[in-house]
Image (cartoon, rainbow, N blue to C red):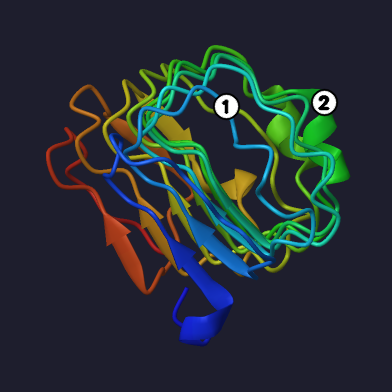
């Protein structure tokens, strides 16, 4: 929210006993830790930055937010997010929910740059291949993933891939575009094989069983 002036912001965090009265149109709204079960109806349709993390939201409809840029739904009760198709979103935070599937609708997020879906229950991730070419940072750590076979080579702006704290036993760096600078594979304690290792600015293999480092 730093880019917004004070008069453009509305903050009502950890005030669950106090009614939320927004009252006017704000560009940035933060409603963290209020035990909300849904996004309040008086959140203006023109909001650009919306943080409703750490609540009790199980279903979400954000279709009315025509110009939303950043959406934080982390630490809620979401089991799916196929209804989130806003083409204006550049940052989407869904960490620490109960999501098991990456839906085909991910392709509709045409401007997405940062996608954080760490600490969920992902079982099906094949649709990550449909992430837009704008994607720069991908966080999918702590999901119990036993394999990663998604070809991301077409995502030529991708700079960071976070796969830490999963259950991978091997990983092939050739699945990633040359643009990737940071690859986090740490704390995959069963990881023994990393194929086609190349020189990254940051490669974290701590707390794995990988002993040999190779460079192309």
Task: Name the quadrant containing residue 107.
Answer: top right
Residue at the image position 31 percent from the left and 60 percent from the top:
203
Label 1, residues with CA under 10 Å away: few <14, some 14-19, many ≥20: some
Give the mark nearer the N terminus: 1 vs 2: 1
Q: Position of residue 70 (x, y in %)?
A: 61, 59
Q: Nearer the viewer, residue 71 or 206?
A: 71
Disc assigned to residue 104: 2
Disc assigned to residue 25: none
In the depicted structure, whether residue 48 falls above or below residue 119:
below
Q: Position of residue 27 (x, y in %)?
A: 65, 70
Disc assigned to residue 38: 1
Q: Position of residue 54 (x, y in %)?
A: 35, 36
Can residue 3 be seen?
no
Q: In this view, does 14 lie to the left or right of 177?
A: left
Mark 1 against mark 2, which lies toward the viewer? 1
Label 2, residues with CA under 10 Å away: few <14, some 14-19, many ≥20: some
Q: Nearer the viewer, residue 170 or 23?
A: 23
Can residue 156 be seen?
yes
Asked which secondary structure carries label 1, the reply is loop
Residue at the image position 81 percent from the left and 62 percent from the top:
67
Q: Which of 144 and 23 is in front in this view?
A: 23
């Amino acid at each position: 929210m730093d880019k917004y002036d004070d008069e453009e912001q509305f903050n009502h965090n950890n005030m669950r006993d106090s009614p939320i009265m927004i009252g006017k149109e704000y560009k940035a709204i933060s409603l963290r830790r209020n035990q909300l079960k849904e996004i309040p109806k008086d959140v203006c349709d023109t909001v650009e930055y919306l943080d409703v993390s750490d609540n009790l939201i199980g279903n979400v409809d954000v279709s009315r937010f025509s110009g939303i840029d950043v959406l934080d739904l982390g630490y809620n009760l979401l089991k799916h997010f196929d209804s989130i198709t806003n083409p204006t979103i550049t940052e989407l935070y869904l960490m620490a929910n109960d999501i098991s599937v990456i839906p085909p609708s991910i392709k509709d997020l045409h401007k997405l740059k940062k996608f954080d879906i760490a600490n969920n229950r992902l079982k099906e991730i094949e649709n990550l291949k449909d992430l837009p070419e704008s994607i720069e940072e991908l966080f999918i750590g702590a999901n119990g993933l036993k394999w990663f076979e998604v070809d991301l080579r077409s995502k030529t702006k991708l700079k960071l891939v976070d796969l830490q704290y999963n259950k991978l036993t091997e990983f092939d760096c050739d699945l990633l575009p040359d643009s990737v600078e940071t690859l986090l594979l740490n704390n995959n304690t069963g990881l023994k094989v990393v194929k086609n290792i190349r020189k990254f600015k940051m490669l974290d293999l701590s707390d794995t069983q990988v002993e040999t480092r190779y460079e192309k």
